Image: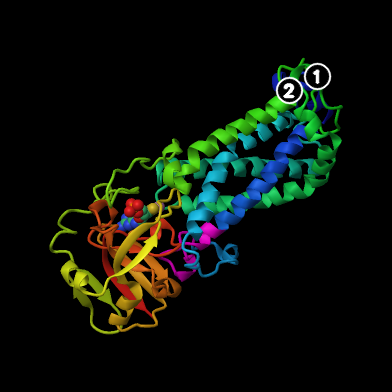
Amino acid sequence: MLAIARSRPPGPFRPGFWRSPLRGPWLTAVFGLVLLVGISVLFVTGLLSYAAYNPGLGRVNDHTPGKGLLGFYLFTWPTHPYWLYRVTQGVHVTLGVVLIPVLLAKLWSVIPKLFEWPPVRTPAHAVERLSLLLLVGGAIFEFVTGLLNIQLDYIFPGSFYTLHFYGAWVFIAAFIVHVGLRIGRMRRALRSRSLSAELRTDTAHTEPEPPDPYGLVAAVPAAPTMSRRGALGFAGAGSLALLVVTAGQSIGGPWRRTALLAPHNRNPGRGPNGFQVNKTAAAVGVTAAAIGPAWRLHVHGSGPALTFTREQLLKMPQHRAALPIACVEGWSTDDQHWSGLRLRDLAELAGVPHAGSVMVQSVQPGGPFSNVLLAGNQIHDPRSLLALHVNGAPLSINHGYPARIIVPANPGVNNTKWVGALTFRT
Ligand SMILES: Nc1nc2c(c(=O)[nH]1)N[C@H]1C(S)=C(S)[C@@H](COP(=O)(O)O)O[C@H]1N2
Ligand SMILES: [Mo]
């Protein structure tokens, strides 16, 4: 041990290397408190997002069939209020983006600890450092996979859910241990200085925090080039800027134009079909032939299969519902006025009036999202439609012509476009 201690490498491993006079337990605790609250909300909204897919319905919807006990909290996702998923997922994605500057500031404030020497002092110290590896690694993994997913669409084909879901549990376990170990220290540190006094202190009057036993305060602090107020303001302004260019994609209305970071066309055109398209028909290989005059809807239930042309569907009683599309990527549309057939009427036609689930199949070839299971409560909600029209016009090809699913509070991905078959089961 002594030999290792003596062989301390140069550079960041030397106590004199880290010289910012701002680092200290108080500043770390302020960022830590914001992350404590924010990450708790991220975790809960993330669990809700997973529940919203109704993975309990079976293999078709469940992208993490090996989850075991981790699905303990799953429940049937409600259809009320109809904007539920728009809010929970909008908060999840927006908050995740907004917390990035705070996460970076927090990591900056503790970075000297990464270069502790000797790297391991005692077995307990080794366990603690390992838990920090899971904590920091887990945080970076969750933020990076989340960001890639919202910016580049499904860069991890089919497995984003698996990675982000298991990553979240690893991360949250390390997070809970970390909070348990540090909450006392955080509270003491927060009480050690007054926030309002810090916010009135300029650079010239900025003094280092008193030396601390944890090694955050610089051993040889440099003269300040920025106040603590400046550091908090810098991170806060970063978060605010991200909020302003992100939140509009979920809030909608005139705010949509401020969503500069939104990956999905901020200006999706005019007219009845002028709202965001996630994937175009061409992008997913839906051919003109598959949705042309030869298209049929096949409805399976208790009796022989029923087959309908679009004209036949249009002659049946049409119902209306004003519902948004809300995507797992955080963007959502404003309420659109859909009309078409009620899923519960189709269930009745199929001879399964008390249907407990329906398997929705798209004419889209292959792909993990062309088959979806919807639950009984979703079928029986009178606003759940197999939509043929939107805002008074026939669905455009990119919005799912000839027919698509629209269900209140349903994650966008389960509102299947270009539907070819429905199979109702009790
Ligand atoms: N067949 C099929 N349906 C689909 C998709 C798809 O790729 N294929 N994308 C889903 C996703 S992820 C979303 S968010 C919504 C978007 O609907 P919109 O493009 O009409 O806005 O459609 C869903 N329905
Ligand atoms: Mo989506």
Between 318 and 380, the one lying in front of the other is 318
Question: Who's the residue at 75% across and 25% down the image?
Answer: 22
- State which quadrant residue 368 falls in: bottom left
Instruction: Tell me the kind of residue under disc 2.
Output: Ser
Q: Where is residue 218 drawn, in percent x and y?
A: 79, 23
Left or right position of 40 against 405: right
Indicate whether 360 appears above or below 262: below
> Is residue 110 or residue 43 the one in the foreground?
43
Q: Which residues are magenta?
A: 48-64
Q: Residues within 10 Å of mark 1 (few under 14, many from 20)?
A: few
Query: Does the closest atom of ligand 2 sit within 8 Å of the Cβ of label 2?
Result: no
Q: How is the image coloured?
A: rainbow
Quickly name the residue at label 1. Answer: 205
Counting from the top left corner in percent of width and height, residue 266 is at 38, 40
In the rendered structure, which amino acid carries the disc numbered 1?
Answer: His
The residue depicted at 53 percent of the width and 36 percent of the height is 242
What residue sits 22% from the left and 77% below the top? 306
Precedes in sequence: disc 2 or disc 1: 1
Q: Using the numbered discs, state the Cα–Cα distance from disc 2 to disc 1 in whole angstroms.
A: 8 Å
Please tell me whether residue 46 is drawn above or below residue 59 in the rendered image.
Answer: above
Residue 227's tag is: 2
